[in-house]
Image (cartoon, grey):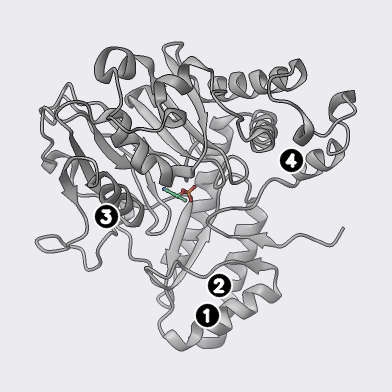
Amino acid sequence: MTSRPFNFAAGPAMLPEAVLSRAADEMLNWHGSGMSVMEMTHRGAVYLSLFEKVMADFRRLLNLPSHYKILFMQGGATAQNALLPLNLLGANRKADYVNTGHWSTKSVNEARQYGDIHLAATAESTAGTPHSHPFTFIPPISDWKVRPDSSYLHICGNETIGGVEFWQWPDMKALGAPDVPLIVDMSSHILSRPIDVTRFALAYGGVQKNLGIAGLTFVVLDEALIRDRVKAPLPGCPTVFDFRKVMENDSMFNTPPTYAIYLTGLVLEWISAQGGVEVLGQRNQEKAELLYSALDASSFYQTRVERSARSFMNVPFYLPDDRLYESFLKGGQERGLINLKGHKAVGGLRASIYNAMPIEGVRALCAWLAEFEKEHA
Ligand SMILES: *Cc1c(COP(=O)(O)O)cnc(C)c1O
């Protein structure tokens, strides 16, 4: 096998090599079944046993109480931008959103098709703030204006493009909206550290950043949100995307993405084998601190995100001269450091250092940062 590069892509992202080799070993014959997982009927006992273990492992790693349900769906977090309002807006069709970046903006714009959407806070404008770039900070939570009769408040826990992560969750009581359920897009930091999911009525995301391959979406929700609160989706919600139907049918209303679920199962087993979410949280902190301190120690590289909102998963940074990017990326590639280009919305560079990125990858990146600075400063 040729040596694998350190892949800093934001998603689909690097997977643990152990997961890939296991998938390869089991490709033609899963546990003596004589079949590949891809070939199994989702209603058969063999697949169901696998499916139930994935659900149980996910529940255990999230530390979920029994009144929380896990739904496996399709369409990515992007589909949820429509499905959340469709399922949750209820009769008054009011929802509040906090806009901290690219992904929140997408959520807001999609939701506007379905109801009366209010921005409780936004980091789009820097006016009246000490910040010089939009979407590089989280507006102080105590200043958020949440409508108390809103159907929910939506936040993006980790802005994958801007590199802005929540380290403190809003307290809905303190915001004067004790009855408003809190919803979070956790696509890019799910299981990256211990997070008390019961702070949220619902958490969702695609798994291709930290938990598997493209094709599977998770929705983790307090069943009371549907059972006691909204009761029914807006008219016109496709049946296959009606949370009640998905829940009643244990995420098998129709054919689920069977192989993607299996792969997530392998990633969950890998997380457990590493020592669980706490151990990964410590490792992720160590990796992020290593990279941020290398960037901070240099006057050559720049970061823009407010320190208290820095993401441990996605680290955007900039070079002092636009003409240098090409050679930085090329030199990185030659050293096996790939996909470091920033998202076109913000430019610059970005290192995504999810669970599967070993600390050796971050060390190699730091060595390249030092070498490149020496050459060009
Ligand atoms: C990647 C990402 C999305 C979009 O996910 P898709 O699976 O492509 O729909 C949404 N939100 C966040 C925070 C993301 O990182």
- Quickly name the residue at label 1: 373
Which residue is more in the foreground, 12 or 316?
Answer: 12
**Viewer-nearest of discs 3 and 2:** 3
- Quickly name the residue at label 3: 137
Rounded to the nearest angstrom, the CA distance separating label 3 from label 1 is: 27 Å
Residue at left 57%, top 23%? 252
Which residue is more in the foreground, 218 or 369?
Answer: 218
- Quickly name the residue at label 2: 369
* Mark closest to the chain's N terminus, 3 or 2: 3
In this rendering, position of residue 81 left or right of residue 150 = right
Residue at left 59%, top 46%? 214
Q: Which mark is residue 19?
A: 4
Where is residue 221 shown, x and y percent of the image?
40, 23
Q: Marks 3 and 2: CB-CB under 8 Å?
A: no
Q: Secondary structure at mark 2?
A: helix
**Viewer-nearest of discs 3 and 1:** 3
Rounded to the nearest angstrom, the CA distance separating label 1 from label 2 is: 6 Å
